[in-house]
Image (cartoon, rainbow, N blue to C red):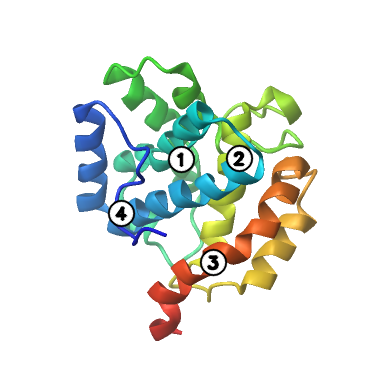
Amino acid sequence: MRAVGEFPHHFDHPSDISEMMKLLRYKHEETYHHCVRVALLSEKAALAMRLDAASTQKLVRGCFIHDLGKLLIPNAILDSVKPLTEEQWALIKRHPEYGSDILKDKGERDADLVRLVLHHHERWDGKGYPYGLAGEQIPLFARICSVVDAFDTMMSPRPYRRRKTLEEATEELLRNAGTQFDAAVVHAFVPMASEVTPLYFSIYDRED
């Protein structure tokens, strides 16, 4: 497994998108490293779901840039240890739209990538954002990204909470399969999850 901070090997963006990710790394390094880890996790998910090479490449690329829109979210909100106000939460919920707008502005022509970025916070039950899509209305790549994004968030510590154990994180995915997440994606990914735990141990064991 590649070290955190290394580009996924499927990363092959136009140079301007690469520059935008460098800006994200400079602006908020933890968000950047989260994007790297989500891309690495998506490779495991793609393997578990037996995606072909072209689909895997596209999925990994999309997962790497899924939080690009957080370039436009103030760090004071991203780093807040207090409950967000209604206005702050509304701004956070705009980051998928901001990200898709950045991609289109930079000339990204792959609609699948734009849709992944736009819809990675939709929920299987229709209670997500920004459009409240449900079930298979949500593009497959976005449904996969949703699962691995949540897994990484749970496995990573935050100032206001400890990170979850592997068992806790996978139990949470399973508990929300069919409501928040596509159950087929969850059940494919969970058996692979133990293979990525060294990534988190290497980063965080010294901090716990």
- Crowd rating for badge 1 (residues with CA inside 10 Å; few <14, some 14–19, many 20+): many
Q: What residue type is labelled 1?
A: Cys
Q: What residue do we see at 68% from left, 27% from top?
A: 133
Q: Work out whether mark 3 precedes mark 1 in sequence or the reverse, and give the earlier one.
A: 1
Check disc 3 and give the amino acid type: Met
Nearer to the camera, 25 or 57: 57
Q: Distance between the residues labelled 3 and 1?
A: 17 Å
Q: Which of marks 1 and 4 is nearer the N terminus?
A: 1
Residue found at x 50% / y 31%: 53
Residue situated in front as seen by the camera: 88 or 173: 173
Earlier residue among tags 3 and 4: 4
Q: Can residue 157 be seen in this view?
A: no
Spatial separation of the CA atoms under disc 1 and disc 4: 21 Å
Q: Where is residue 147 in the image (x, y as percent from the top left)?
A: 62, 47
Spatial CA distance of label 4 from label 2 is: 27 Å
Check residue 155 in the rendering and tell me which mark sits there, or answer none: 3
Label 2 and label 3: CA atoms lie apart by 17 Å
Quickly name the residue at label 4: 75
Q: For label 3, count other residues whose C-alpha is less than 10 Å away and answer few (under 14), some (14-19) or many (20+).
A: many
Position of 193 relative to 16 (above/below): below
Q: What is the three-letter code of the residue carrying label 2?
A: Ile
| Quadrant of the rendered image containing residue 29 | bottom left
- Secondary structure of the residue carrying tag 3 is helix
Return the residue at label 2: 144
Task: Locate the N terminus by quadrant.
Answer: bottom left
Residue identifier under label 1: 63
Could you say where residue 126 lies in the image, as x and y percent from the top left? 73, 33
Identity, as a three-letter code, of the amino acid under mark 4: Asn
